[in-house]
Image: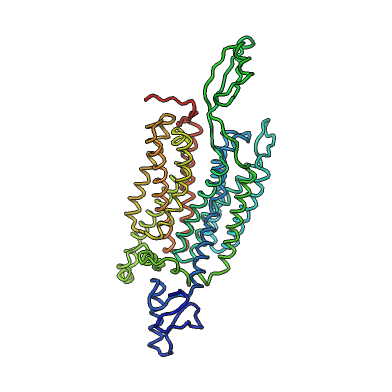
Amino acid sequence: MPLGHLDSCSCQQSPKSPGIFRPFGDTKTQRARAAGLTRHSRLVWGGSCLRPRADVTMAFLIHLLVCTFGMGSWVAINGLWVELPLLVAELPEGWYLPSYLTVIIQLANVGPLLVTLLHHFRPGCLSEVAVVFTVLGVGTIACTLFAFLWNVTSWVLGSRHSIAFLVLTFFLALVDCTSSVTFLPFMSRLPTYYLTTFFVGEGLSGLLPALVALAQGSGLTTCVNVTEISATTLSPETTRNVDSPQGASSTLVSELAGRAPSMTHLESRYLPANFSPLVFFLLLSFMMACCFVAFFFLQRQPKRWEASIEDLLTSQVTLNSIRPQEGKDLCPPEESGKAQGAPEEKTAPQHLARLAFIYVLVAFVNALTNGVLPSVQTYSCLSYGPVAYHLSATLSSMASPLTCFLSIFLPNRSLPFLGVLTVLGTSFGAYNMAMAVMSPCPLMQGHWGGEVLIVASWVLFTGCLSYVKVMLGVILRDHSRSALLWCGAAVQLGSLLGAVVMFPLVNVLTLFSSADFCSLHCSA
């Protein structure tokens, strides 16, 4: 039967309440039955009466808008990271550029810190919608300016620096960091069901730039012959490097080789990109503009959200898991009735302990996924070759939105289960870290099994912890609106701590070693 028709129960739509059906007649008994039917239909798809096709279309559109809105949370900074292989070859900072970006992104945490403090000490002083519009507008403008100013350099303290690039990076980081404490509180206006869709969009913020970078060909390398010629007759310290494609000969090399001793070896060289960073940053600005438009339509249709919460999926497991329990979700449903009559002081300690555990878990998971492991991904993967590195980066980016989508069908709010899943994901992260420490000669280097293991480990690490993040966000959303604000603060705090810990280990103490894959020789 088409969705726009009714069955034999003879239902009609109430003119006073769009989208709610009641039987013919106007008696109190019939109205009570209609109210019960309406309440039941909000939890389980089907029953005696089906919702019109227009509501299903509206539900799909709202999910699409929420997903696009969530994509704007980190798409700009993720785009910068995947573009680094091209940027470091063009900008004067070279391979110091990632360390510059790490410091700038952490400085941008002043944005979420300011929003959190204002919310705590002066609640209501910030217009939530206006702040989100400002964040998305600044992000769109900054990405557009990036397209034209990314390679502009200036002289500072006697050397050239990419001042425009670094300043625009700060504004992009300010946008993305602030989104953690502005986007999530806005999502508390929507039913719990849409929060999972928001996290799917947040996962796409890493996937889409990665796919664009793969199409661009950024970071792809080839091995070339490099001949070092020592001009000992002129100066014992003079050395010249002449590059030639692998297997090709060079007239200049042969002439110089006859005069001075030479040595040839293989080195990696980046291949030309399919399109320039100008096009890449314009695509990023288009993504940010889409997020801006999606939020514009979202905040203009608040009355339709409740009517379309249940219209996309029919899983009773999912619907049972998202039943509204505002302020009570941290307690088991069967105990909620008993807790109402119990003294508040008996439940408060347990309630606060569970909240503290959730916030600590949020900070820990985000420290691993946003700060600790991304800092060493090149060390853990690139020793296995560029193919393993690109597969791990791309597939792990795909794992995040796919896991968020999976959580719609298989939700589990059990804190012990989420704790076990966190331990499992951390174990995969520990393997990735161990391979980074052993770089440039990790386990099974040069064997296809090692490549499969490192790619699978990165995918499972991202997938497990992404599921944990989604479920913790759903729990906190049902607890209270302010809980999502503090959830965003915990996300940024964990990311900050992870980056602060890893920055000196990678850039100061240099505990991790890199090597050119083309000239790498490890003992068996």
Task: Check the picture and name the quadrant holding the C terminus.
Answer: top left
Can residue 505 be spotted in the picture?
no
Between 154 and 321, the residue placed more toward the observer is 321
Between 347 and 184, the residue placed more toward the observer is 184
Between 344 and 280, the residue placed more toward the observer is 280
Residue 193 in the image: above or below residue 451: below
Residue 498 position, x and y percent, is: 46, 43
Q: Quadrant of residue 249?
A: top right
Q: Quadrant of residue 10?
A: bottom left
* Residue positioned 53% across, 47% down in the render: 211
Residue 523 position, x and y percent, is: 39, 24
Q: Is residue 86 left or right of residue 468?
A: right
Can residue 45 be spotted in the picture?
yes
Residue 49 in the image: above or below residue 85: below
Q: Is residue 53 left or right of residue 422?
A: right
Query: What colouring style does the render use?
Result: rainbow
Task: Check the picture and name the quadrant holding the N terminus.
Answer: bottom left
Residue 39 position, x and y percent, is: 40, 76
Q: Residue furthest top?
A: 233
Q: Quadrant of residue 483?
A: bottom left
Instruction: State the count of labels.
Output: 0
Residue 176 position, x and y percent, is: 55, 51
Residue 70 in the image: above or below residue 263: below
